[in-house]
Image: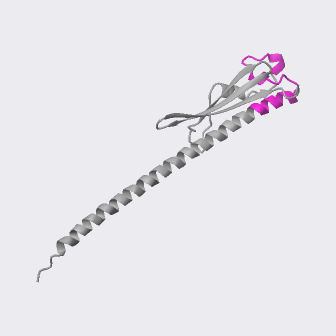
Amino acid sequence: MRNTSAGFALIEVIISLVVLSAVLAGATGLIWSAATAVERNQDRLTATYLAQECMELARNVRDSAWRQHLPWDCAFEEFPTPEQCDTLSQPIKAMKNGEHLLPLFGEASKFSRTMTTTKNGEERAITCEVSWPRRSGTEHIFLDEILTDWRKI
């Protein structure tokens, strides 16, 4: 009596290996896309916090000028009059030229942020932009706010 099922078992093993490799390839692709999405969301969250910090700095400088009895928007001027604004610390100047963030744990940060100010009568439009490189180009986060002399309101 001959065993005719020996070749059939080999075909079953080959088919099961093909099915198993297809399932593993799909799982690997799913893990890869999930890891990419996590990295992208981390970068966007960090950039959002950096833009928020930029805006808080703008409000802080406005309020510091008020406490020192200086014009509220002298920190946002390109060339403020020295007699009025020379006592105000000017941390915004670095951001207006595109500040590159300090190294963290010995590594240079990939994020840079820029503050843009536009005068609109008695108001200042502040835009904080945070940018960082990606494989597909450069990504940006923008945060806009209108600052006013709130003492007059």
Residue 27 higher or lower than 117, as above or below: below
Rendering quarter of residue 104: top right
Image coloring type: one colour
Verify whether residue 98 appears in magenta. Answer: no
The answer to whether 32 appears left or right of 51 in the picture is left
Quadrant, the N terminus:
bottom left
Rendering quarter of residue 28: bottom left
Question: Viewer-proximal residue, 85 or 105?
Answer: 85
Q: Residue at x 58, y 46 (%)?
A: 42
Residue segment shown in magenta: 58-85
Verify whether residue 65 appears in magenta. Answer: yes
Residue 4 higher or lower than 126, as above or below: below
Measured from the top left, where is residue 18 in percent x and y?
Answer: 29, 61
The answer to whether 101 appears left or right of 68 in the picture is left
Magenta segment main secondary structure: helix
Q: Residue at x 21, y 69 (%)?
A: 10
Measured from the top left, where is residue 30 in percent x and y?
Answer: 45, 54
Question: Viewer-proximal residue, 145 or 47?
Answer: 145
Rendering quarter of residue 85: top right
Question: Viewer-proximal residue, 82 or 128?
Answer: 128
Q: Residue at x 72, y 34 (%)?
A: 55
